[in-house]
Image (cartoon, rainbow, N blue to C red):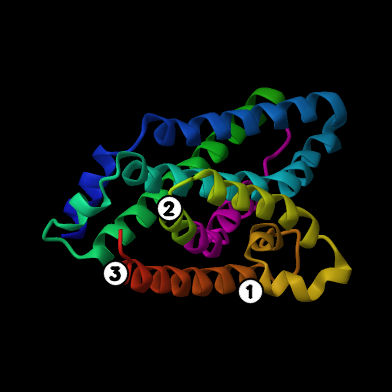
Amino acid sequence: MMWRALRAEGMRLKPAACWLPVISSGLFIAFMALEWYLYFKGPAGVYGVFNVMYMFLGFVMLLNTALLAGMIAGVEHESNSWKQLLTLPVSRAVFYWAKALWVLVLLLCTALLIIAGLLLLWICYTSEPLPFQFLIRQIVYSFLASAAVLGLQMWLSIQFSNQAIPMSIGLLGAVSGLFIARDSSAALWTWVWPWAYPTLSSPFMAHPGRWIGISAGLGVMLLAAGTLHFKNKQF
């Protein structure tokens, strides 16, 4: 049943949702290349790209999470097809998780495209040895630590028919997360602000696995709570 729901959800995906991982990863790689060319010179300077990645990778993953959740949930809102869809002999929970899994798949595509783009950029730009393991950890950790925000954005996108609201919340959360994660005076906020988790999960930070575990656990709880609410929601 889940596989059929995933296939059906995939057929309803907007072209913009499919292109978003390609466009966002391409822009991110282009930004990295520009920073590399303008500011990081010499054999040692090429490794400065990881500092730039640390600063902005979490923002890209979080923004994509908000946009993808809005696009995928917005299909039914725009066509007013929730009632028709939910009359089908498929559990509401299956519909909810199928949408969340598609967001997860497209986020994974974003992470893989960034990895591939940075590998190509490194090969073209320098002959210095690439810290491949660090590169993979930096990107994969950020992807995994986005789980909590995925759970929250999925619920918001189902709740509001106007997708500008959850997308705006996601944008503000992503921007604020950049600062909260680096503000030593906001230590308490880092625990309760899921938008800070991708930045805190960087290998540059202490105990990155802690934030991945917190995000994964919170993400599952939020998705479970969202599923329960969705099962009782009236459209």
Residue at 80% x, 56% y: name it.
179
Residue 202, horizontal then vertical, whole percent: 69, 58
Amino acid type, mark 1: Arg
Amino acid type, mark 2: Leu
Residue at 76% x, 47% y: name it.
55
User: What is the crowding at mark 2: few (fewer than 14 residues within 10 Å), some, or many (at least 20)?
Assistant: many
Q: Main secondary structure of the magenta part?
A: helix
Camera sees residue 126: no
Check disc 1 and report the residue beneath it.
210
Question: Which one is in front, 213 or 98?
Answer: 98
Check disc 3 and report the residue beneath it.
231
N-terminal of the pair, mark 3 or mark 2, is: 2
Image disc number at residue 104: 2
Amino acid type, mark 3: Lys
Q: Residue furthest left?
A: 89
In the visual, does 110 lie left or right of 2? right
Residue at 84% x, 24% y: name it.
38
Residue 75, horizontal then vertical, whole percent: 34, 41
Query: Which region of the structure is painted magenta?
Result: 127-153
Q: Mark 1 falls on what kind of element?
A: helix
Residue 60 occupies quadrant = top right
In the visual, does 151 lie left or right of 145? left
User: What is the crowding at mark 1: few (fewer than 14 residues within 10 Å), some, or many (at least 20)?
Assistant: few
N-terminal of the pair, mark 1 or mark 3, is: 1
